[in-house]
Amino acid sequence: MQERLRLQYREQIFQHYLITDPNTLILGHCNITKNKIIEIEDRTNSGLLERFGDKREDFFTGIGTLVASEAERSLFYEKYLNEPSIRAFENGIKEVLMPCFVKLPNYPQGRYVQFKVNLVETPDTGDITGILTVTDITEKTIQDRIIRMLSSLNYDLVADVDLINDQYKVVSGGDHNITETQGSLMERVRRVVEELVVDSEKAYVRDMLDPGKMVSRLKDGEFYSFRYSVNNGSNEIQTKNMIISAIDLSLGRICLVRTDVTDMLAAERKVKYDLEKALSEAEKASRVKSDFLSSMSHDIRTPMNAIVGMTTLAQANLSDSRKVEDYLKKISVSSQHLLSLINDILDMSQIEQSKLHMNVQVIHIDELLDQISSIMASPSKDAGLKFMVERGEIQHLYFQGDALRIKQILINILSNAFKFTMEGGNVRFRTEEIPSYESGRVRYRFVISDTGIGMTQEFISHLFEPFCRSERVNRVEGTGLGLSITKGLVDLMGGKIRVESQLHQGTMFEIELEFAVADGKQKRSPNADECIPEESLEGRHFLLVEDNAINSEILAELLQMWGATCVLRENGLQAVEEFESSVPGTYDAILMDIQMPVMNGYEATRKIRSSSHPEAKTMVILAMTANAFAEDVQKSISAGMNGHVAKPVDMKILYNTLMALLDD
């Protein structure tokens, strides 16, 4: 067994010196335990053994001085001096590797090398033998760096360049009419410039590929790039991007990487065009909104001016009841117009944010049409127009829908027809039932046509955009949101709207809406427009919950006008305490504000409904709040309220709602 170990040891040493790889620079072995170099084969012809001596510690210390980097030199000593080598062997490490950059005596430009020491036990003595191999890995290191750089590039030519020796080698790709893959760099540059580069850029490309200037530019950074144009041989001009990277300037080694950026530039131009277009549209939208705000400022200030002015005149003429009555009528009209403007803005905001919800109820189609006709009869007469209402074949009279929003759609379009039709003109409003898309549903078609001023096709294409107003009709007041709101409401209902118009020949709107069929026996919600016989609220007693002193004063006096009395509380907690301490039969209803300090209206209603008072479940609670959207109505109902009246309070709506709830 001992003899076999001796043979294996001698065979390993013998085979070590038979290595013929041309990149092998140094071979040798030594006795680490006895600090002695046994043999060194220096294929660099640098006289390393004579230079550094045959003591192993001195020899490796001397070799370490050839390592260019101080950090790498320190690491070299930590790996290869005697003490760390022995420690490595004792820890079971059999091979110690380290790549680094060295400057050998006969290689002034330096080389990348890999040191390898195999640690083996010497038979018989047990000493530690170190078998040394030093290999030149310069080309492999350069290629690895090039490959790492190329991994993120889409290239059509890669060349490894040795500036010191004026040599290049094509690693990948090439040019269509230059077949050589290696040779003189300057000759290659000359041919590329003469045969491929467009005339106007030849001098520029020569300058960017001048060896001296390349080195100078790379000293300021790891790489630089430039673009130039070439003729691809098919009379097509392509744009190339050349990246010059420093691989190792101490060796004069650089890498040329060329990519075709023709498509990329086309894409960049498209992106630039799209961005410029988007910017233009954004600026246009900003101008439109600015114009809208300017118009809104005018439209809001107009009724506000009337309200403020008429109030001042009324105060100055209190003794003249006729004048005061006239002023109050004009204040009322201006207030309604101002409220309409505000509602339009809020509706548009809700539609754009998809927050508008439908308040579905059972509707009779004839009653709906009668209400719309009644509302529009007076404006048509004032405008001197002939207003014709036509009813086609209708089989289903009852359906489930949001009456307020349906009227809003149709009245918006009818109002526009009245505005833009000259005196003596005609406005036609026709309703008919058409086949529905699904069973159990009814589909109505509403057609509104006029003989008015009409619209251009270009304006029609923007008709439903927010803030859109025709420049020809700026004298007509409004927000410019009416048709945008109309389109939004039609879309929310899953309907269709279509418009046809010719300048000076009139306009036709066609709206199709589909609803679930109702049987007419379901409970119908009270409608503010229905004419309920006027009855006094004499003897009625209400709990009024309102934190705003002016609002509470207004509501109290309005109720007193109908003969009712009320008790005022300023927040939800006070309302709960008042109700719970009251004798049954004290109050007919609670009129509850929503946004209040201490406890809001929703919380107060829930507290009342869950209390032990005998009337907790039956007491009529009516929300009276500025929260006027459909979801606010739903929140009120969910909290346990019986109804909802929006502020500013319309006394007719309040009266009709109270009578409907109190008579149930």
Image: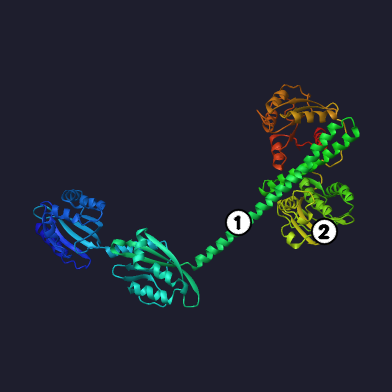
Q: Which residue is mark 1?
A: 279
Q: Which residue is mark 2?
A: 453
Quarter residue 529 falls in = top right
Asked whether residue 360 is in view, the answer is: no
Residue 451 spot, x, y in % from top left: 85, 59
Task: Decide which of 434, 214 is in the foreground and name it.
Answer: 214
Asked whether residue 79 is in view, the answer is: yes
Q: Which quadrant holds the C terminus?
A: top right
On screen, residue 599 versus residue 20, left or right, reads right
Q: Amino acid at mark 1?
A: Leu
Query: What residue is shown at x 82% (from left), y 31% (from top)?
Result: 558
Q: Secondary structure at mark 2?
A: loop
Query: What residue is shown at x 38% (from left), y 70% (from top)?
Result: 172
Residue 44 spot, x, y in % from top left: 18, 65
Q: Is residue 241 above or below residue 443?
A: below
Q: Is residue 618 above or below residue 529?
A: above
Q: Which quadrant holds the N terminus?
A: bottom left
